[in-house]
């Protein structure tokens, strides 16, 4: 929809949009906070109404499937007819990955991905006292904190050994796990769900031989690019499972990038800045940037989407976890030797009311910053954004030691804890030299 609205504002293109959903132009990232009750209703997540979109001249077809893309003849065949195109944008997003757990088809078992999922979950929660969440990625931990605050007995199960396994190193992830426990969430890691039990509706879940009662189960075990129709049309699918694109986000068709077909969002494969490897960036902020690149290219301007760092933050109750660049695990997988530095400080001057603990971990490769993780109740996003810029600019450990930080008692200490983390990294480098 960001591409569509850009084109209507800046070009004379006729724009036709197909979506299999009943809703469009809304914030998926806000769904957990509606379920918590912090946001009063799902309608508040709608960025632009259907009437407003159609008022811009966009031909909007909701609840409509495109079944075939005929790339050779530049046509799409949908439920409602055949449409010719001069330019095609494939932004089919992702779909939930549901593990083959026995009982996953029972009533009361839901994914949480799109608006209709959240509406169905909200209805189910009205008749629920116990909920179990499978998967402790970003959505899993956010929804766990939201539902326990709603007053529900909440259990979070992760097959891997930590929460946020794709986002944080184990030492940092333990802070989030402990915080969830303090809220009243039972966190179970390193154990798989064996079965979801019940006759027609879910009644319990078996985890590591233990039977846990639950009336609602939310499956948040990750996403897969939704690329079946693109693959069937002959567009190239990369090792990530996403559609292969170049720096302009043009789509590859049988090894050749086309000037009139683009892709963006969670279905598009892009390049990671640190590893140089293909990746999928599952961030709303990344999707908006991709939309701008696609729109500008369709408006006659050569525009590129640079290799990505995917800076991200996750709001877990009142605690925020942020990460940018690579983690220690990604470094190991890509044979990148890293040295880390860590610090624990405060978000404000120690004597100022409201000062909260601030945890920082930095990763350096060849003395250049390649990853950062920050956890606190405040000041996380700002530091992650600064680290994102520092990584992209190639900042070294010595550059960061010369970094001048601002100070005022209500918002910082005299020396920002960032400096202590960089200091620690420098000492670790010298110790291993």
Image (cartoon, rainbow, N blue to C red):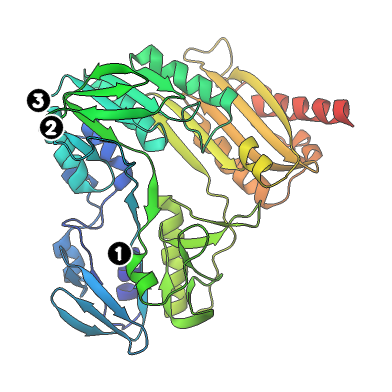
Return the residue at label 1: 1
User: Gap between marks 1 and 2, in whole Å?
Assistant: 30 Å
Vertical order, 34 against 115 (above or below): above
Residue 37 in sight from this viewpoint: no
Q: Residue furthest right?
A: 433
Q: Nearer the viewer, mark 1 or mark 2?
A: 2
**Which circle's residue, 3 or 1, is located before the other in the chain?**
1
| Residue 208 percent across, percent down from the top left | 37, 20
User: Helix or strand or loop: what does disc 2 sit on?
Assistant: helix
Q: Is residue 396 left or right of residue 283?
A: right
| Residue 244 percent across, percent down from the top left | 50, 68
Residue 127: mark in rendering: 3
Q: Quadrant of the N terminus?
A: bottom left
User: Gap between marks 3 and 1, in whole Å?
Assistant: 35 Å
Q: Is residue 280 left or right of residue 106?
A: right
Return the residue at label 2: 124
Q: Residue at x 27, y 76 (%)?
A: 68
Q: Residue at x 65, y 36 (%)?
A: 328
User: Helix or strand or loop: what does disc 1 sit on?
Assistant: loop
Q: Residue at x 34, y 28 (%)?
A: 193
Vertical order, 154 against 35 (above or below): above
Residue 341 in sight from this viewpoint: yes
Vertical order, 9 against 91 (above or below): below
Are the two marked residues, 3 and 1, in contact with CB atoms closer than 8 angstroms? no
Q: Residue at x 14, y 23 (%)?
A: 128
Are the two marked residues, 3 and 2, in contact with CB atoms closer than 8 angstroms? yes
**Which circle's residue, 1 or 2, is located before the other in the chain?**
1
């Amino acid at each position: 929809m960001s591409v569509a609205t850009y084109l209507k504002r800046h070009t004379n293109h006729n724009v036709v949009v197909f979506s299999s959903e009943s809703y469009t132009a809304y914030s998926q990232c806000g769904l957990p906070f509606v379920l918590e009750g912090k946001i009063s209703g799902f309608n508040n997540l709608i960025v632009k109404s259907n009437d407003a979109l159609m008022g811009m001249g966009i031909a909007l077809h909701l609840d409509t499937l495109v079944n075939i893309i005929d790339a050779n003849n530049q046509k799409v065949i949908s439920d409602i007819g055949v449409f010719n195109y001069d330019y095609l944008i494939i932004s089919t997003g992702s779909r939930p990955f549901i593990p083959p757990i026995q009982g996953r088809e029972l009533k009361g078992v839901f994914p949480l991905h799109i608006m209709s999922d959240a509406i169905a979950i909200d209805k189910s929660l009205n008749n629920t006292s116990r909920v179990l969440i499978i998967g402790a990625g970003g959505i899993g931990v956010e929804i766990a904190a939201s539902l326990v605050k709603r007053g529900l007995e909440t259990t979070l199960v992760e097959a891997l050994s930590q929460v946020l396994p794709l986002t944080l190193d184990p030492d940092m992830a333990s802070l989030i796990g402990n915080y969830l426990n303090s809220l009243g969430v039972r966190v179970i890691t390193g154990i798989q769900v064996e079965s979801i039990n019940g006759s027609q509706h879910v009644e319990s879940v078996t985890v590591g031989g233990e039977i846990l009662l639950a009336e609602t189960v939310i499956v948040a075990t990750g996403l897969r690019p939704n690329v079946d129709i693109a693959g069937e049309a002959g567009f190239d699918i990369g090792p990530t499972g996403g559609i292969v694109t170049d720096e302009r986000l043009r789509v590859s068709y049988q090894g050749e990038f086309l000037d009139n077909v683009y892709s963006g969002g969670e279905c598009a494969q892009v390049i990671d800045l640190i590893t140089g490897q293909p990746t999928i960036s599952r961030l709303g902020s990344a999707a908006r940037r991709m939309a701008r690149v696609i729109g500008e290219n369709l408006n006659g301007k050569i525009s590129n989407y640079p290799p990505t760092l995917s800076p991200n933050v996750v709001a877990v109750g009142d605690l925020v976890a942020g990460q940018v660049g690579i983690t220690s695990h990604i470094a190991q997988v890509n044979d990148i030797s890293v040295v880390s530095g860590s610090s624990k400080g405060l978000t404000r001057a120690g004597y100022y009311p409201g000062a909260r603990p601030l945890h920082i971990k930095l990763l350096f490769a060849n003395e250049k910053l390649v990853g950062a993780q920050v956890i606190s109740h405040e000041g996380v996003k700002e530091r992650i954004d600064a680290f994102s810029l520092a990584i992209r600019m190639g900042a070294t450990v010595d550059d960061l030691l010369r970094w001048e930080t601002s100070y005022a008692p209500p918002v910082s200490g005299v020396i920002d804890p960032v400096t202590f983390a960089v200091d620690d990294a420098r000492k670790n480098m010298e110790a291993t030299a």
